[in-house]
């Protein structure tokens, strides 16, 4: 009879278009479309900010100051001194380091940056003293597009002036470099590419998969518990010659199947879109990702998620059985989503690694275990304990669910 109820629940589930959308369309098409669009939009915005023309104003520099030539040679950067003077109807001597004119021009974005040169620049340069220039810009979007383009130009000019100064002491270029930078550090990371990618992707993969599993389980669970109460079909199911345990198990297995289907669709979507991006658009990061992580790693990660999916399926079914109506069940599911997300976010924090202490923290332990699997550092002893402990929690929760279903005061509470 358990298989008959399972087929009945699955048939009702597949008739519901909303459930199919959460199980198949959401992970396969909607999520990739949303994240892909956001990524393309972000890349385009950054490119535009890095390539848009910059108008600048230099104050305090003589006509032979090398900064004029350095900025004139830079691509996409142009002087706007005459424009600022004309717009404000000012003579040239009105522009100084304290002038409100160019500050207002920065805020109005008619110019993008102002470079103030100290008046005694040439004198200090000859006396081998340090000069201090001020780079003023108006930045509220956090991208620092001006600084990221202007500072390298000034750094290059700094290097040229330093080499010229050292040349006066008849030093070779090699000796000059040794004086400029007495210690040169070559950073060599001995971590393999798989370890780096696994560390970056491990937490993110769980962060994507587990909420999809939750969504895949949530709506079928609400429909099979609170939904059946509202439709009045639960009573007819209870009076059949089937034990309450079998009814709960059939519903529970249907919810687990729906949740796994959502996770499987997400992984297939990940592989499909990864292949399309790698082959079609030749994005280097995706090529590295697909080439480094094997399919076995992804399915091993999915296996690690199994007991957690069992646990979540039991929780959502318990909530649905307790809820008096579809709406009340939805209200209970909101806080549950938060309780799932918080341990996932903790697992993504830098410096958090899988240890015996973290192995005892539900949800976080699975997210950290997936990260270790993708890094290739899986310790099967610890992973087995995490898997079995999470499975034990799922069994306890399923037992609680069956207990609630057997209690009329809970099942038909008013």
Image (cartoon, helix red, strand yellow):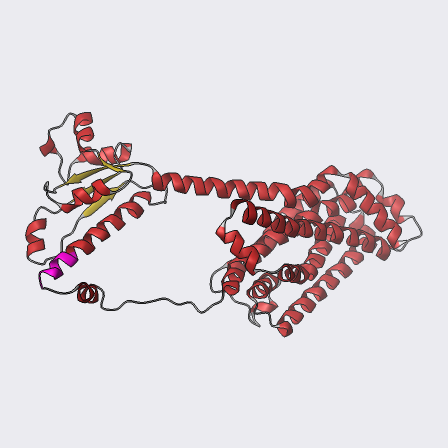
Say whether residue 268 is magenta: no
Q: How many numbered callouts?
A: 0
Judge left or right: residue 78 versus residue 89: right
Judge left or right: residue 71 versus residue 388: left
Farthest residue, direction bottom: 381
- Place of residue 71 in the rendered image (x, y in percent of width and height, measured from the top left): 22, 42
Question: What residue is shown at x 13% (from left), y 65% (from top)?
Answer: 171
- Place of residue 210 in the rendered image (x, y in percent of width and height, measured from the top left): 63, 54
Image quarter (top left, top right, bottom left or bottom right) of the C terminus:
top right
Question: What residue is shown at x 51% (from left), y 60% (from top)?
Answer: 197
Question: What residue is shown at x 64% (from left), y 68% (from top)?
Answer: 386
Main secondary structure along the magenta-highlighted residues: helix
Q: Quadrant of residue 184?
A: bottom left
Judge left or right: residue 331 versus residue 91: right
Q: Quadrant of residue 356?
A: bottom right
Please tell me whether residue 233 is drawn above or below residue 170 in the rendered image: above
Question: What residue is shown at x 55% (from left), y 60% (from top)?
Answer: 292
Q: Is residue 414 visible?
A: no
Please tell me whether residue 359 is drawn above or below residue 326 in the rendered image: below
- Place of residue 350 in the rendered image (x, y in percent of width and height, measured from the top left): 47, 61
Say whether residue 165 is magenta: yes
**Which stretch did the figure color magenta?**
162-169
Q: Is residue 256 visible?
A: yes
Closer-to-camera residue (103/77): 77
- Place of residue 309 in the rendered image (x, y in percent of width and height, measured from the top left): 69, 57
Closer-to-camera residue (10/36): 36
């Amino acid at each position: 009879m358990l298989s008959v109820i399972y087929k009945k629940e699955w048939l009702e589930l597949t008739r519901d278009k909303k459930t199919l959308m959460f199980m198949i369309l959401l992970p396969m098409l909607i999520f990739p479309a949303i994240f892909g669009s956001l990524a393309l939009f972000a890349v385009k915005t950054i490119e535009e900010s890095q390539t848009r023309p910059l108008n600048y104003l230099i104050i305090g520099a003589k006509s032979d100051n090398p900064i004029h030539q350095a900025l004139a040679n830079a691509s996409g950067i142009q002087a706007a001194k005459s424009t600022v003077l004309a717009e404000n109807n000012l003579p040239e001597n009105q522009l100084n380091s304290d002038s409100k004119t160019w500050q207002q021009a920065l805020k109005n974005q008619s110019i993008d940056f102002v470079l103030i040169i100290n008046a005694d620049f040439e004198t200090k340069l000859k006396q081998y003293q340090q000069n201090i220039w001020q780079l003023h810009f108006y930045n509220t979007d956090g991208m620092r597009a001006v600084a990221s383009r202007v500072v390298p130009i000034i750094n290059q000019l700094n290097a040229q002036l330093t080499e010229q100064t050292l040349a006066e002491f008849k030093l070779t270029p090699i000796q000059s470099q040794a004086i400029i930078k007495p210690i040169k550090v070559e950073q060599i990371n001995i971590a393999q590419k798989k370890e780096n990618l696994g560390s970056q992707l491990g937490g993110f993969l769980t962060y994507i998969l587990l909420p999809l599993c939750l969504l895949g389980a949530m709506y079928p669970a609400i429909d099979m518990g609170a939904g059946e109460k509202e439709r009045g079909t639960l009573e007819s199911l209870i009076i059949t010659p089937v034990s309450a345990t079998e009814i709960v198990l059939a519903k529970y297995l249907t919810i687990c199947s729906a949740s796994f289907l959502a996770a499987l669709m997400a992984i297939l979507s990940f592989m499909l879109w990864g292949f399309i991006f790698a082959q079609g658009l030749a994005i280097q990061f995706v090529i590295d990702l697909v080439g480094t992580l094997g399919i076995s790693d992804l399915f091993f990660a999915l296996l690690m998620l199994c007991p957690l999916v069992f646990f979540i399926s039991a929780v959502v079914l318990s909530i649905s059985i307790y809820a008096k109506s579809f709406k009340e069940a939805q209200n209970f599911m909101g806080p549950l989503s938060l309780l799932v997300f918080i341990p996932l976010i903790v697992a993504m924090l830098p410096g958090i690694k899988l240890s015996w202490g973290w192995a005892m923290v539900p949800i976080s332990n699975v997210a950290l275990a997936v990260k270790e699997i993708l890094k290739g550092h899986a310790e099967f002893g610890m992973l087995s304990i995490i898997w079995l402990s999470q499975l034990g929690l799922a069994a306890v929760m399923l037992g609680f669910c069956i207990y609630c279903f057997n209690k009329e005061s809970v099942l038909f509470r008013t």
